[in-house]
Image: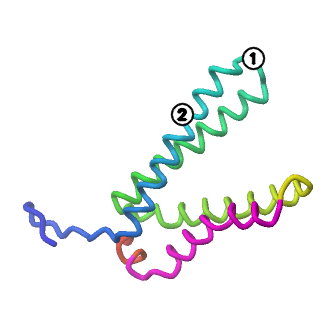
């Protein structure tokens, strides 16, 4: 597709659009959660640590959403790395909280990162779109 300036523009695959929108929503919700947690428990150090983690997670999600939407080449490896970390966190959470968790919790927590990883790794159009 030619733009008016004559520079060739890459077509954004539908899956990348959906993933970018979901990451954007996730980032906004994580930042809102951090803000409301800060309001409720200003004096609790554990809550403050959670606010810092949630804010960092939200900002990373927003940056990745923008990078995927703009088809930045670095977005693919970073998104894959984040999803691998999400899988590892889900498995560790399951192991460490075993009496409280069930296999359905593990399945639900692993489902989204696994689908995203499969899509990013198996779809050739994604790799082509995210190359410079």
- Residue 8 position (above or below residue 34): below
Tell me the quarter of the picture where residue 118 sits.
bottom right
**Residue stretch rendered in magenta on the structure:** 102-125
Residue denoted by label 1: 43
Tell me the quarter of the picture where residue 116 sits.
bottom right
Q: Which badge, 1 or 2, comes first in the chain's sequence? A: 2
User: Magenta-highlighted stretch: main secondary structure?
Assistant: helix
Q: Residue furthest top?
A: 43
Q: In front: mark 1 or mark 2?
A: 2
Q: Write the residue at 74% across / 29% down.
A: 47
27 with respect to 73 (left or right): right
* Crowding at mark 2 (Cα within 10 Å: few <14, some 14-19, many 20+): some
- Judge whether residue 28 is colored magenta: no
Q: Nearer the viewer, residue 91 or 80?
A: 91
* Crowding at mark 1 (Cα within 10 Å: few <14, some 14-19, many 20+): few
| Disc number placed over residue 55 in the picture, else none | none
Q: What element does badge 1 sit on?
A: loop
40 with respect to 91 (left or right): left
């Amino acid at each position: 597709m030619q733009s008016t300036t004559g520079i060739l523009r890459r077509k954004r695959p539908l899956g990348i659009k959906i993933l970018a929108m979901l990451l954007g929503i996730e980032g906004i919700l994580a930042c809102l959660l951090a803000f409301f947690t800060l309001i409720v428990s200003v004096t609790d150090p554990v809550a403050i640590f959670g606010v810092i983690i949630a804010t960092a997670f939200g900002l990373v999600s927003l940056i990745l959403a923008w990078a995927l939407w703009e088809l930045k080449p670095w977005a693919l490896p970073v998104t894959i790395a984040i999803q691998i970390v999400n899988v590892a966190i889900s498995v560790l959470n399951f192991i460490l909280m075993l009496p409280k968790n069930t296999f359905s919790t593990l399945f639900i927590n692993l489902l989204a990162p696994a689908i995203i990883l499969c899509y990013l790794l198996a779809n050739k159009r994604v790799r082509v779109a995210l190359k410079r």
